[in-house]
Amino acid sequence: MSKQFDPNDRYAQEAKKQGYRARSVFKLEDVQNKFRVLKPGNRVLDLGAAPGSFLQFISKVIGEKGLAIGVDLQKIEPFPESNNIFTYIGDIFEDSIYERIAKDFNFNQFDVITSDLAPKTTGVAFMDGGRSLNLNLKVLDVCGKYLKKGGNAVMKILPGFNEGELVGPAKKMFKQVKKTRPRAIRKSSGESYIVCLNKL
């Protein structure tokens, strides 16, 4: 999915107007409005965080007493307007990145884990869907290790795989698992989000 600015896209225009780095911020905003996954003071881990619009939104919701930590393979430019955002360059599949975070902050349990991860798409649905599934199964694995009991998670999914392969394991880990399609998703996109509430 392209995150480049489209001057004819009203969500992109609004993101630029409000100082957000990408239109995807409104997807998380929609999830928050529906499910209240984030609360003031939360510690939040955002996977696949570049360019950082999720982190910007999370920062505002959690406030000064909260903490937003972003991980991505590419460098995320600093956020001079926020003092509760910290970023790491790292691979979500490598445990060393989570060990570094735990060492730096002296904790390894988060209240919320968000993910806007998506594979580089090929246009072949079953391949793209399969790669999306693999990413999200890893997010679930991270939730199992680093998400507090009662915590929430948000994951982006692409079509092309049996959603039961993801929803099934998620339902064993969370009290509620919901699928939602935020309004800011482009009509041409098949993506949606899985919202997992209240970790068991």
Image (cartoon, rainbow, N blue to C red):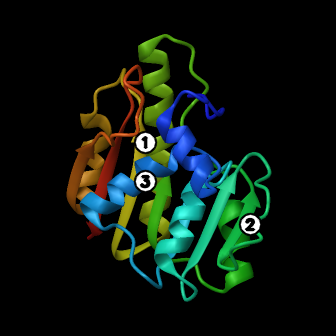
Q: Is residue 8 visible?
A: yes
Residue at image point 35% right, 43% down? 193
Residue at image point 35% right, 66% down? 152
**Dot 3, crowdedness within 10 Å: few (<14), some or many (≥20)?**
many
Image quadrant where residue 102 sits = bottom right
| Mark positioned earlier in the residue sequence (3 or 2) | 3
Q: Are marks 3 and 2 in contact (CB under 8 Å)?
A: no
Figure check: 197 above or below 182? below
Where is residue 140? Give x, y as percent. Answer: 42, 53
Q: Residue furthest left?
A: 175
| Tag 1 secondary structure | strand
Q: Which mark is residue 79?
A: 2
Tell me how far mark 1 sits from mark 2, CA to CA: 24 Å
Mark in front: 1 vs 2: 2
Residue at which label 3 appears: 28
Give the amino acid at mark 2.
Phe
Give the amino acid at mark 1.
Lys
**Dot 2, crowdedness within 10 Å: few (<14), some or many (≥20)?**
some
Figure check: 73 above or below 9? below
Image quadrant where residue 31 sits = bottom left
Tell me how far mark 1 sits from mark 3, CA to CA: 10 Å
Where is residue 83? Give x, y as percent. Answer: 70, 79
Where is residue 73? Give x, y as percent. Answer: 73, 46
Residue at which label 1 appears: 156
